[in-house]
Amino acid sequence: QVQLVESGGGLVQAGGSLRLSCAASRSTFSFNVIGWYRQPPGKQRELVAAISRGGSTNYADSVKGRFTISRDNAKNTVFLQMNSLKPEDTAVYYCNFRAVVTGENYWGQGTQVTVSS
């Protein structure tokens, strides 16, 4: 079992920045894919960004050029740097760790990001 603890959410004005962190209770190296998802009010959860064990990344079109995902395996932590935030980025953000071989799939508790116009 792995516990994921998220931090870094909050209230920010449009155009501002936030950095989300997700710390795992054990090594993240065994997880093939780590991602950040978000769930806006009244909408379904959607993938924002993902990073593979090898460091390959992919992003939702809506955040390309503004968000950056990174991982620090030594600190068992993944980050989401969010710049040029827009009101439509308002959502609860969740980190997700998946291991293909073992089938492990863990979610963080979620952190609220609110962007005011």
Image (tube, helix red, strand yellow):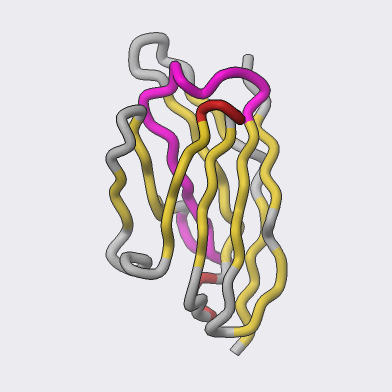
The residue positioned 43% from the left and 22% from the top of the image is 31
Looking at the rendering, which quadrant does residue 93 occupy? bottom right
Residue 96 on the magenta span: no
Q: Please state, as top left, top right, bottom left or bottom right, where the C terminus lies in the image.
A: bottom right
Q: Nearer the viewer, residue 84 or 39?
A: 84
Q: Please state, as top left, top right, bottom left or bottom right, where the N terminus lies in the image.
A: top right
Q: Judge left or right: residue 111 versus residue 59.
A: right
Counting from the top left corner in percent of width and height, residue 101 is at 35, 11
The residue positioned 54% from the left and 47% from the top of the image is 79
Q: Determine the main secondary structure of the stretch shown in magenta.
A: loop
The residue positioned 43% from the left and 26% from the top of the image is 98
Q: Is residue 17 above or below residue 27?
A: below
Q: Judge left or right: residue 49 versus residue 13.
A: left
Q: Nearer the viewer, residue 89 or 58?
A: 58
Extent of the magenta region:
24-44
Work out which residue is located at the far bottom of the displayed protein and give it. 117
